[in-house]
Amino acid sequence: MTLHEKYKVDVPVGESGEWKVEKFKVEEEDVKSQRMRAAFHPGEASRIVPAGEYTRLIHRGNVVMSDTPAEILDHLDFIQEAKGKVLINGLGLGVALNAILQKPEVEQITVIEISEDVVKLVGQHYLNKTNGKLKIIVADALLWRPEKGEKFDVVWHDIWDNICTDNLSQMSKLHRSYGRRCDWQGSWGKELCEDLKRRGW
């Protein structure tokens, strides 16, 4: 079984406010086009989406997240580290959440999500699949604070729609906030953002 087969989401299609979950297909012809583009932009080769059916989360017509193999790989470090008591800042399509719900060593998960519509559209689906293991709080991850003395084994920050150097300041803020509250933490796209900054983009 591939990582994509193991971790692809099963969130149903639907809409809530300005948010939408939809299925989409990638055909072999699309893959050929991706490979041609990657030939001129080598950095895109690892992001080629194989033919198949996928799910994506859309906000105001823009794709925020999908369950393509490359996006699942973006969360792999976190998925491997996840155990015990886990905090996820940002729900999105729930790719990371879906993966760690499959790990018996993960005992408790708290998700902080700013959008009530995303919680209705995506979060409720996962709440219905768990038996008290998952808690979702509607709040701004940059402002929300755990209870005094509360700690986590693993924390994952994933509140950004795209990868750009502007995200680094928020990542630093979140990492400082949880530095003494967890054993391990990471941010989606952090290494790529740092690489872009080094190259002056």
Image (cartoon, rainbow, N blue to C red):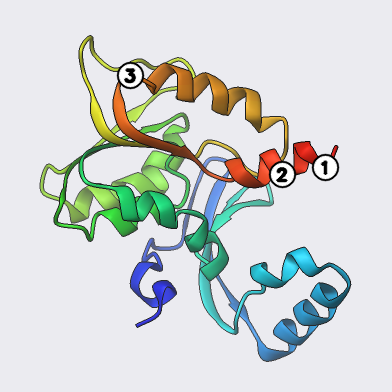
Q: Secondary structure at mark 2?
A: helix
Residue 195's disc is 2
Q: Position of residue 75 (x, y in %)?
A: 46, 53
Few, some or many residues within 10 Å of mark 3 (<14, 14–19, 20+): few
Quadrant holding the N terminus: bottom left
Give residue 35's mark.
none
187 in relation to 131, above or below: above
What amino acid is found at the position of numbered circle 2 in the picture?
Asp
| Residue at the image point whose x is 54% and y is 60% from the top | 71
Location of residue 167 by image quarter: top right
Q: Secondary structure at mark 1?
A: loop
Q: Which residue is mark 1?
A: 199
Relative side of 23 to 198, left or right: left
Instruction: Judge from the rendering whether residue 7 lies leftward or rightward of residue 13; answer left or right.
Output: left
In the rendered structure, are the residues bearing label 1 and label 2 in contact, judged by CB atoms less than 8 Å apart?
yes
Residue at 76 percent of width and 43 percent of height:
196
Q: Residues within 10 Å of mark 2 (few under 14, many from 20)?
A: some
Asked whether the viewer can see residue 94, the reply is no
Badge 3 is on which residue?
180
Spot occupied by residue 105 in the image (x, y as percentages of width and height): 15, 52
Residue 96: horizontal and vertical position, in percent? Answer: 39, 52
Determine the residue located farthest toward the right in the rendered image.
40
Mark 3–mark 2 Cα distance, whole angstroms, equals: 26 Å
Dot 3 amino acid type: Arg
